[in-house]
Structure formats: C-alpha cells, structure tokens
Amino acid sequence: QVTLKESGPVLVKPTETLTLTCTVSGFSLTNARVGVGWIRQPPGKALEWLAHIFSNDEKSYSTSLKSRLTISKDTSKSQVVLTMTNMDPVDTATYYCARIQGTTPVRWFDPWGQGTLVTVSS
Amino acid sequence: SYVLTQPPSVSVAPGQTATITCGGNNIGDKSVHWYQQKPGQAPVLVVYDDSGRPSGIPERFSGSNSGNTATLTISRVEAGDEADYYCQVWDITMIFGGGTKLTVL
C-alpha cells in the first residue's frame, strides 16, 4: 500500500523558514520515473502546485514562489523535504505531498498525503 | 502560463447527471486529470489521462477531452458525490483549475 505523510510545524512566525517533510512508504524514491510533489491549499481556496522532484533528482518549482522554495530528497529515509523561506500570513494553508504517476507529458498525483495545516502568525 | 478555467459551482439533483467542465487553450492536446475533494479531506484522483478510471472509482465517473474543453461527467449522482472537483494538466509544470463545487440538491 502506497502512503505519504506530511510532517512539520503547525505554527510559524512571519519571516521564518518552513521545513516540511513527506515520508513515503510502499514505493521507493529511487524507482525510475517516480516523483513526489508538494501542493498547498489556503483555507477555502483552490489547490496550488508548489514543487516536485523525480528519482533522477530533476526538480521543478512554481514560478511565483521559486525564489523561496527548495525541494530535496533523502532516499535512505524515504523522505522528500520542502523548505519555504520568508513565511507570510498569506502562506497559511494545508500543505500536501503526493506521488506523481505517469510519464511526461502525462503526469498526475496519486495518492495524496493527508495534509498538514500550517498557520503563519506572530 | 497555461490557465485552466472551471465553473465555480454546479448543482444537480440526485440520480441526474453532473457535468463539470475545464477550459483551456487547445486543452484537447493535453492529458487532463480530475480530483475529488470532500470537506476536510485530501484530494482523490477520480479520472486520469482524460478518461482513465483508477481502481476503486465507480464507473459513474467518466471523462472526455476535446478542443478547448475537458469534461468530467458523473452519472446517477449520489449525495456522497458532493465535493469540490479540480482538473489538472502538465504544461512544463503542474497546473490546477480553480475548482468546482458540486452541490447535490
């Protein structure tokens, strides 16, 4: 059974750096064409893709957030880590990680983690 | 950047057919995927690659894609289908539509 689980702080202060970890099971981050992405959803709003990383270490970032995001993976721990710098209250959202399926240009997210709500407030 | 446009809301009576659209420039040339998100839950894939149905998803869920519009069709709608639905494509990066709230009357 493939599962993903997000972990990280529930509350961060403005200007701080957020570090989120996605721990996966049921598949290996070294498998060919395997990818993991991060998606966020502000309360009551739509899904927003943030970044993803593939087994060959290929990375991609949202254009609007690229300067603030870093994605990496630790295959020995089956973890994908996302850092976001200079957090602001508008970054308050539920952050999801999800496995990427398919092959370019046909790629989708399945399954998703349960999500973790991050609130940015002083 | 590529934009996906969804109607904010769709309403349908139980037992009827719900149609949710996802508009984009020549979206028919892309592969479209659909997610269902119920309140307080993570999204779940219901259609992939325009019309594929993941294991465990009822046959009532189907998809199509042509021209400038992709469509998610839910037949014989049930109360449990009430949720937000999002379309998604790959265009260099992952892109989501703005979501459609399906209300079952």
Image (cartoon, coloured by chain):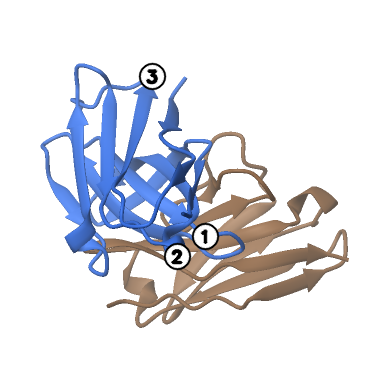
Chain colours: A blue, B brown
Task: Name the secondary structure under disc 2.
Answer: helix
Share a chain, discs 2 and 3? Answer: yes
Viewer-nearest of labels 3 and 1?
Answer: 1
Q: How crowded is mark 3: few (under 14 residues within 10 Å), some or many (20 or more)?
A: few
- Name, please, the residue furthest toward the front: A122
Q: Disc 1 residue type?
A: Pro
Q: Disc 3 residue type?
A: Gly
Q: Which residue is drawn at 35% across and 80% down?
A: B26
Q: How far apart are marks 3 and 1 (CA)?
A: 29 Å
Q: Which of A99 and B17 is in front in this view?
A: A99
Disc 3 marks which residue? A26
Q: Earlier in the sequence, mark 1 or mark 2?
A: 1
Q: How crowded is mark 1: few (under 14 residues within 10 Å), some or many (20 or more)?
A: some
Q: How far apart are marks 1 and 2 (CA)?
A: 8 Å
Q: Earlier in the sequence, mark 3 or mark 1?
A: 3
Q: How far apart are marks 2 and 3 (CA)?
A: 34 Å
Viewer-nearest of labels 2 and 3?
Answer: 2
- Residue B81 x, y percent position in the rendering: 74, 52
Q: Residue A90 carries which label?
A: 2
Q: Which residue is drawn at 27% across and 78% down?
A: B1
Share a chain, discs 3 and 1? Answer: yes
Q: Which chain carries label 2?
A: A
Q: Which chain carries label 1?
A: A
Disc 1 marks which residue? A42
Q: Residues within 10 Å of mark 2 (few under 14, many from 20)?
A: few
Q: Disc 2 residue type?
A: Val
Q: Which of A50 and B101 is in front in this view?
A: A50
